[in-house]
Amino acid sequence: MEDIFKLNDVFFNYYFLTGGLFLSYLIYRILYSFISDNNYIHSKYTIRGHTWRSIECNKSIPYNIYCTVCGKLMLPLVGLFCECCAVTACQRCHCTIEKRFKCKPVSWPSDKPFHHHWVNVGTVRAENPDNVEDTIKKYFCCWCQRTKLSNIDILNNSEECDFQKYRNIIIPPACVQIEKGLITNIKSIQDTNWEPLIILANRKSGSNRSDEVLSIFRGLLNPIQVVDISVMSPASVVRWLPNRCRVLAAGGDGTVASVLNALQSAPHIKAPVAILPMGTGNDLSRVLGWGPTCSSHLDAHFIIASIKQAEEQVLDRWKVTIKPKRRRLGRLRPDRVLYAYNYASIGVDAQVALDFHNARRQFLYRYASRTLNYMAYAFLGAGRWLDAGGCAGLERRLRVRVGGARDPLPLPLPPLQALVALNIPSWGAGVHLWGMGKEEVPEQSINDGKLEVVGISSSIHIARLQCGLAEPFRFTQASRVKIDMEGSCAMQVDGEPWMQGPASILIEHSGHSIMLRAINRRSD
């Protein structure tokens, strides 16, 4: 009995220490958010009207530091600019500026000429400052990115805009059909070089920087091309995509998987996917050369250039069918079908991911960052060393068969706490599980129609793998994996975890997806 009390004290002290550290860091993040100059706070985008940001936010397009209405010099903390058209206003004038200056139109009648959308972005000092007529104003077109100097007002100039710099990736407003505020169709342009770029960003990804991504691209492209998928699902976007385009998925591995799943429902659309890593692990981004994380300063022009230069890469797609064995109200629960692009796993690594998933739902987690995410994973993983979360003795509850549907071979399992089926050579934020160790193993590929099956003995084993001080149990390569699981255990597919009850799990090949591999970009 005394030993039980001592063990309870260990658990209490561990969780008390972990909770205290998290609370201290979150308080720091809250205070830092009030004094920092990162003003990419949530703002609701609407098709009609301006969307305001701090003038310190966006460096990809020019803007005026003087209010367009009253001419007041604006400080960075109080000055505002529209992230779509670059018009500026002070706190007092931004509510009334709508009557005088319209935002860039996302749709336009096809039978009418489309003109430049000029915005006054500053003045050039004249030789005689006292002479108002000598004052030269600088104008910027938020469609073609041209700038023009003039001493007369050209805001109502009727010169047609040709979209110049990014005309091959912009969806012209004349091609957009909108009914009742919803996009119904995009007319294609008869130009073989036209391949519009669609930006899909997820606000809920681990780095909390998706607002920044949305803002920097709305000023360069048609705003309908920049979609917040926490508001509009990827499946809704796919309904109006042109037959040929390129897609940038800004988020973590789960975001990329949701985008790829949505594109699979429209096989007539050729839309290879690039990645802007905004999550915590970003394993697929590492493999495809987009890097383990995005840079501290996002340059929209550099990102667009990288996507234009990227090469297409075929990626295997795996269907995960889960048939529950437990009945509910006298009936078996329906099958669950998921699709994996990175990996699927059962056991302690999925349990840590589930703990983290539950932690990020907390109210204060909106102040999170990638640093906090790594800290969370470290503490939660250490916690699973003390409490395996029902993953101990996993080999006694799993019966695994690999190979063809007719004659699958049973896979003997040593004592372990996790079983992982890999499609790519990156797991757990950059660990190359299959290639670790001195033993020669068959080469791993992301488009060979094979999965690599490996095992992990404990959460301490995970920590050692992260440091390169151990190697996993490498079992086999297989084109089909069937798992019969007794009891309940955590499970995950591409970083999306849940608690799974007794079930029969089948993983089999299900076609391919087309990705974009970065050229001359940093990789992990």
Image (tube, rainbow, N blue to C red):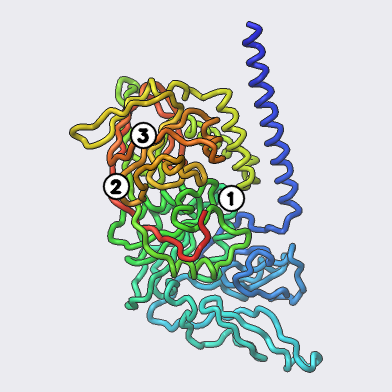
Looking at the picture, how far across and down is residue 115, in whole percent? 49, 83
Nearer mark to the viewer, of 1 and 2:
2
Which class describes the residues within 10 Å of circle 1: few (<14), some (14-19), or many (20+)?
many
Foreground residue, 464 or 370?
464
Looking at the picture, how far across and down is residue 84, in whole percent? 56, 69
Quadrant of the rendered structure where residue 451 is?
top left
Residue 334 visible in the picture: no
Residue behind mark 2: 449
| Mark 1–mark 3 distance (CA, rounded to whole Å) | 35 Å
Looking at the picture, how far across and down is residue 380, in whole percent? 58, 32
**What element does badge 3 sit on?**
strand
| Mark 1–mark 2 distance (CA, rounded to whole Å) | 32 Å
Looking at the image, residue 428 lies above or below residue 87? above
Work out which quarter of the rendered image holds the N terminus and state it: top right
Looking at the picture, how far across and down is residue 63, in whole percent? 65, 74
Instruction: Please tell me the numbered disc located at residue 489.
Output: none
Q: Amino acid at mark 3?
A: Phe
Is 350 placed left or right of 25 in the picture? left
Residue behind mark 1: 207
Quadrant of the rendered structure where residue 359 is?
top right
Residue behind mark 3: 475
Looking at the image, residue 421 lies above or below residue 273? above
Foreground residue, 24 or 363?
24
Which class describes the residues within 10 Å of circle 3: few (<14), some (14-19), or many (20+)?
some
Earlier-in-chain disc, 2 versus 3: 2
Q: Amino acid at mark 1?
A: Ser
Are the residues flagged by discs 1 and 2 in contact, CB closer than 8 Å? no
Earlier-in-chain disc, 1 versus 3: 1
Looking at the image, residue 222 lies above or below residue 272? below
The residue sitting at the right extreme is: 130
Q: Amino acid at mark 2?
A: Gly
Quadrant of the rendered structure where residue 273 is?
bottom left
